Image: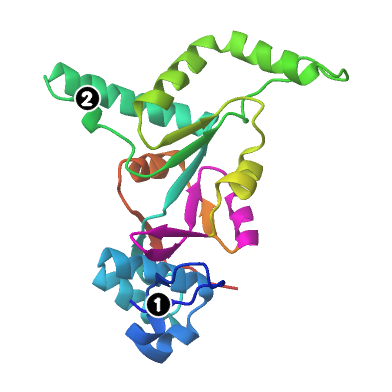
Amino acid sequence: MPECQPSAPSRQALACVNLHGLYGSTVARLPYTFRILLENAHRAGRAADVEAILAWPETGPGRAQVDFMPRRLLMHDTTAVPALVDLAMMRRQVDRASGDPSIVDTQTPVAVSIDHSIGVDFYGTSDAMARNRAREIERNAERYTFLKWADTAFDRLKLFPPGSGILHTLNIEHLATVADVEGGVLLPDTVLGTDSHTPMIGALGVLGWGIGGLEAEGIMLGHAMPLRLPEVV
């Protein structure tokens, strides 16, 4: 891996995947989004996916399927609760079989925002938000007891309670890193989310799009998501 030049003398130089050096002039013909997919496949050692992505300019969209593993996952309460219940039941079954329940854990960092199921019982007053939040927790106490347990039980889960903000605003303003550093290597931030507005993160140059709850649950457990190479406009 080559060195990526630091932007200031005080910053340490980092290594990065040199796609142009590895795969030649074909990389320049790929859309930038596909270069991120290519880097993802290269680091994971998925040779068939690398070949399919490099062949895209000739083969066109929709003819090849590749795997993609995002660096993080974004979920809201409507989709996260059923997925977390599944993981909790898996832990219960492992415990019943005299195993260690903690082996069932989130393998990909997951951020859960409680913002989709909030009711509006009060409005038009300065204390409306606080009263709605209190009413929500009272109305769904069992759900929040479970979510507080999940927040401590699963290592890579971060929970944002009611009132923290809208899911995608949290993603853009607090969660997105644009680039991460892992073992001295600079890696692009990528995210998949269980909401159709997830591509908003593209405003920061981060690759991300919406998926379904079952796909998200597979990613939570460390499985890559299969996708057909799309058409790029």
Q: Nearer the viewer, residue 212 or 137?
A: 137
In percent of width and height, residue 164 lies at 64, 31
Please tell me which residue is depicted at 32% across the width and 28% down the height of the picture: 87
Please tell me which residue is depicted at 36% across the width and 86% down the height of the picture: 21
In percent of width and height, residue 71 lies at 41, 53
Image height of 78 relative to 110, above or below: above
Image height of 50 relative to 167, above or below: below
How many numbered marks are there? 2
Please tell me which residue is depicted at 48% across the width and 58% down the height of the picture: 189
Point out the stretch of residues depicted in magenta. Answer: 179-204
Image height of 200 relative to 46, above or below: above
Q: Amino acid at mark 2?
A: Pro
Q: Nearer the viewer, residue 109 or 132?
A: 109
Q: Which mark is residue 3?
A: 1
Q: Which residue is mark 2?
A: 101
Along the horizontal axis of the image, is 39 left or right of 45? right
Magenta span has 196?
Answer: yes
Q: Amino acid at mark 1?
A: Glu
Along the horizontal axis of the image, is 215 left or right of 46? right
Q: Is residue 231 visible?
A: no
Q: State the residue lying farthest toward the left.
A: 98
The Cα–Cα distance between marks 1 and 2, rounded to whole angstroms, is 42 Å
